[in-house]
Image (cartoon, grey):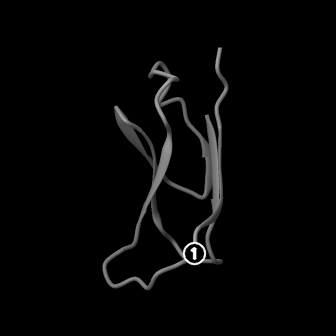
Amino acid sequence: MQWRFETPAHVPVNAWLCHPAQCVALGSARGSTMALSGLSASEPLYMRFALSPGQRPVRVQGLQVIVNYQ
């Protein structure tokens, strides 16, 4: 599974890729993981974002998740 999202340059956000059974913390705006392998493919995936305390709101856009299903 691969993901990507865009934020304004040099603005960190806390991000997770989630399945109803589990969430995986994302350490960067793009990457891949096998952490959700084996979970039901009939359930939705979603991204969750949070700001650090005192951080001003930012626009997150260009969300993309690619799942290789076999």
- Residue 21 as seen in the image, left or right of residue 63: left
Q: Residue at x 47, y 18 (%)?
A: 38
Q: Residue at x 36, y 74 (%)?
A: 52
- Residue 35 percent across, percent down from the top left: 47, 31
- Amino acid tagged 1: Arg
The quadrant of the rendering that contains the N terminus is top right
How many numbered circles are shown? 1
Q: Residue at x 39, y 42 (%)?
A: 23
Label 1, on which residue? 59
- Residue 6 percent across, percent down from the top left: 65, 65
In the displayed structure, would residue 21 be above or below residue 32? above
| Residue 50 quadrant | bottom left
- Residue 25 percent across, percent down from the top left: 43, 49
The quadrant of the rendering that contains the C terminus is top right
| Residue 56 quadrant | bottom left
Q: Residue at x 62, y 46 (%)?
A: 3
